[in-house]
Amino acid sequence: MADTLAPSSSPSTGGAHGPEQGTKRDFLKLVTGSFAVIGVGAIAWPFIASMNPAKDVLALASTDVDLSHIAEGQAVTVMWRGKPVFVRHRTPQEIEQARSVEVSSLRDPEADAARVQKAPWLIVVGVCTHLGCVPLGQKPTDPRGDYGGWFCPCHGSEYDTSGRIRRGPAPLNLVVPEYAFTSDTQIRIG
């Protein structure tokens, strides 16, 4: 019986399927891997895309303001990224008052020239730097404090005509947002 059983033959390594040609198994691995990568990409894409800002948020990224209707001495409030922005057309007296302050005497020292691009126009985010309240001073009837700028009635912070903190618990000046003059009578905030 042992004579009838021949040893099994194994395929030779130098046959039609040599190492340089690849096998059906290699092809299946490549196809399976490609489908796996495409599947992961198809599943991950909506999640990654959901992290982008919404169109309504992108629309608020910048705000255009027409300055031509703002009279000297008047202030307007515009919304930018959900925050009030104060745009004030300062009088020559307000400008002189802001420039005459000795910068070294300020809690948050900053010259008026560093806070404005064109002298009569002051643009600041209207949020008190103490606890995030909105200071008064935009309307002619609002109290503006001893320095003629803005007054936050919540804790008594007072800002001058350059939006710099002068009295009260607020640690910093009103923030000057990024803005640019697109014409003599137009600015873009953001």
Image (tube, helix red, strand yellow):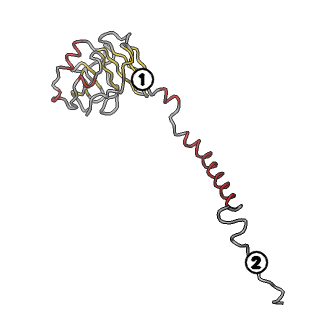
SS class, disc 2: loop
Q: Nearer the viewer, mark 2 or mark 1?
A: 2
- Residue 124, given in percent of the width and then of the height, sits at 33, 24
Q: Which residue is mark 1?
A: 79
**Residue found 17% across the figure and 20% down from its top:** 100
**Foreground pick, 23 / 44:** 23
Residue extending furthest front?
14
Quarter holding the N terminus is: bottom right
* Circle 1 Cα neighbour tier, 10 Å, few/some/many (<14 / 14–19 / ≥20): some
Q: Is residue 147 left or right of residue 53?
A: left
Q: Is residue 92 left or right of residue 20?
A: left
- Residue 108, given in percent of the width and then of the height, sits at 22, 31
Q: Which residue is mark 2?
A: 9
**Foreground pick, 61 / 72:** 61
SS class, disc 1: strand
Does 87 appear above or below 68? Answer: below
Q: Is residue 28 left or right of residue 125?
A: right
Does 29 appear above or below 151? Answer: below
**Residue found 36% across the figure and 27% down from its top:** 178
**Residue found 64% across the figure and 52% down from its top:** 34
Does 49 appear above or below 162? Answer: below
The part of the image, by quadrant, that contains residue 155 is top left
**Disc 1 marks which amino acid?**
Met
Query: Quick check: marks 2 and 1 in contact, CB under 8 Å?
Result: no
Query: Mark 2 and mark 1: span between their CA atoms?
Result: 84 Å
